[in-house]
């Protein structure tokens, strides 16, 4: 791919209108920009967030399923880095629908961790096996703006999420190959464990531990070696 630069970064004419992007996505893209980057470039029929020399950088704030086909197609010919933010700290601002007046402001007790990547990665866990693929996880501080308009989820009693804003990038965690995911396990060598063991060791619900082991099996990092009553027993396989 020829990369002729006139400005530090540029939006290609046929790219999407970045004014229509969600603010969090746009802010992360701005945070990543370097001299010589190209924005919203068209590659193999797809619009790419950032093209940096021979690397395609795609930012996905949620729902890996929506980007699965695109990433797999691009990986056939290109190096692709997927960027995903996880809210380690979230501040929730609730505003009045008509005036935008702030009704409440609070810090959420929920704290996202690197383990939350498996909530999304479960949609395409085998993709890490592709040598052209890499991923960076951003642990961030963010602000979530909510509106009491009666149109939101019943779980939030009709309150809508109208915007998410990046406040600070706290940490960047990079995965260049599948073996990098072994750093997330509290085990090594021939140590055997179950989902229940993993749940207790990491302090996560059992269903989240099941997502972790499902993904790691698809990456061929762990294998099932037996059963203890109704509990599968796993062992690191590489």
Image (cartoon, rainbow, N blue to C red):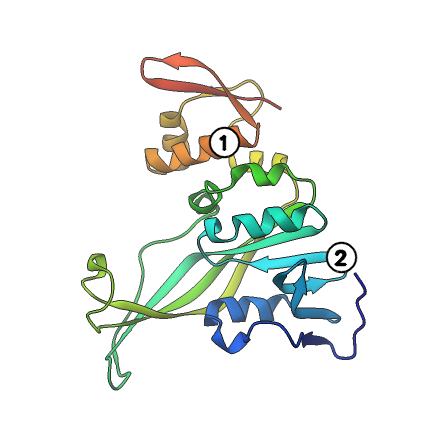
Numbered-mark total:
2
For disc 2, the neighbor class at 10 Å (few under 14, some 14 to 19, many from 20) is few
Using the rendered view, name the quadrant where residue 102 is placed. bottom left
| In this view, 172 is above or below 4 | above
The quarter of the image holding the N terminus is: bottom right
In the image, farthest residue toward the front: 45
Q: Position of residue 195 (x, y in %)?
A: 39, 27
Q: Position of residue 224 (x, y in %)?
A: 48, 19
Q: Could you tell me if residue 168 is visible in this image? A: yes
- Check residue 186 in the rendering and tell me which mark sits there, or answer none: 1
Q: Position of residue 99 (x, y in %)?
A: 26, 86
- Where disc 1 sits, the SS reads loop
Q: Which residue is mark 2?
A: 54
The quarter of the image holding the C terminus is: top right
Q: Is residue 53 left or right of residue 155?
A: right
The residue located at (52%, 53%) in the rendering is 67
Given residues 42 and 127, the one toward you in this image is 42
The residue located at (19%, 70%) in the rendering is 150
| In this view, 178 is above or below 173 | above
Given residues 228 and 61, the one toward you in this image is 61
- Where disc 2 sits, the SS reads loop
For disc 1, the neighbor class at 10 Å (few under 14, some 14 to 19, many from 20) is few
The residue located at (45%, 47%) in the rendering is 120
- Whether the residues at callouts 2 and 1 have beta carbons within 8 Å, the answer is no
Q: Position of residue 44 (x, y in %)?
A: 67, 58
The residue located at (60%, 46%) in the rendering is 72
Say which label, 2 or 1, has the lower sequence index. 2
Q: Is residue 78 left or right of residue 23?
A: right
Mark 2 or 1, which is nearer the eye?
Answer: 2
């Amino acid at each position: 791919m020829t990369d002729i630069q006139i400005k530090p970064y540029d939006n290609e004419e046929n790219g999407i209108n970045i004014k229509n992007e969600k603010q969090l996505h746009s802010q992360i893209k701005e945070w990543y920009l370097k001299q010589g980057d190209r924005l919203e470039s068209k590659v193999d029929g797809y619009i790419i967030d950032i093209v940096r020399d021979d690397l395609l950088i795609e930012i996905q704030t949620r729902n890996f399923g929506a980007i699965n086909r695109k990433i797999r197609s691009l990986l056939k010919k290109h190096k692709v880095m997927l960027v995903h933010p996880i809210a380690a700290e979230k501040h929730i601002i609730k505003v009045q629908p008509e005036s935008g007046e702030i009704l409440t402001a609070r810090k959420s007790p929920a704290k996202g961790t690197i383990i939350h990547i498996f909530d999304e990665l479960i949609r395409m866990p085998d993709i890490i096996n592709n040598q052209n693929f890499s991923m960076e996880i951003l642990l961030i501080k963010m602000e979530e703006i909510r509106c009491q308009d009666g149109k939101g989820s019943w779980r939030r009693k009709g309150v809508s999420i109208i915007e998410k804003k990046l406040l600070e990038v706290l940490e960047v965690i990079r995965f260049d190959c599948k073996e990098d995911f072994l750093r997330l396990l509290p085990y090594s060598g021939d140590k055997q464990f179950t989902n229940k063991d993993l749940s207790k060791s990491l302090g996560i619900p059992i269903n989240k531990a099941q997502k972790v082991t499902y993904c790691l099996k698809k990456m061929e990092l762990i294998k099932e070696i037996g059963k203890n009553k109704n509990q599968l027993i796993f062992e690191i396989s590489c």
